[in-house]
Image (cartoon, rainbow, N blue to C red):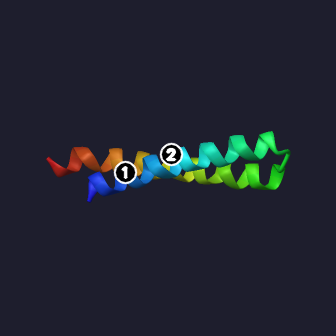
Amino acid sequence: MTAIGRTKAKAEQVIGKTVRKAAHAAHKETLAAKGAALEARGMMRGAKERSKDPFKR
């Protein structure tokens, strides 16, 4: 499950960053905030997955 979780976390980070940058270019601040939130959620998911690794061994 960690591989799936890590992939999901990285995907959320990449999609969030892309949405945020595209929204800033189009001057859509609400959409930029949603992209930043998606990116942050991906970072938190990644941190959760990394914290589970030491307990699996």
CB atoms of marks 1 and 2 within 8 Å = no
| Residue found at x 78% / y 41% | 24
Q: CA distance from mark 1 to mark 2?
A: 12 Å
SS of the residue at dot 2? Answer: helix
| Residue found at x 83% / y 49% | 29
Q: Amino acid at mark 2?
A: Met
- Expressed as whole percent of the image width and height from the top left, the position of residue 23 reads 76, 47
Query: Does 46 sit left or right of 19 as displayed?
Result: left
Q: Nearer the viewer, residue 5 or 28?
A: 28
State which quarter of the image contains the N terminus. bottom left
| Residue 50 image-quadrant placement | top left
- Expressed as whole percent of the image width and height from the top left, the position of residue 48 reads 40, 51
Query: Does 26 sit left or right of 44 as displayed?
Result: right
Disc 1 vs disc 2: which is toward the camera? 1
Task: Indicate which disc, 1 or 2, sits on the residue closer to the N terminus.
Answer: 1
Residue position for label 2: 43
- Expressed as whole percent of the image width and height from the top left, the position of residue 37 reads 65, 52
Query: Does 57 sit left or right of 16 as displayed?
Result: left
Mark 2 crowd level (few <14, some 14–19, many ≥20, 10 Å Cα): some
- Expressed as whole percent of the image width and height from the top left, the position of residue 31 reads 76, 55
Residue 20, labelled with which disc? none
Q: Nearer the viewer, residue 2 or 16?
A: 16
Q: Nearer the viewer, residue 28 or 49?
A: 28
| Residue found at x 29% / y 50% | 52
SS of the residue at dot 1? Answer: helix
Q: Amino acid at mark 1?
A: Thr
| Residue found at x 83% / y 50% | 28
Q: Residue lying furthest right in this view? A: 27
Mark 1 crowd level (few <14, some 14–19, many ≥20, 10 Å Cα): some
Residue position for label 1: 7
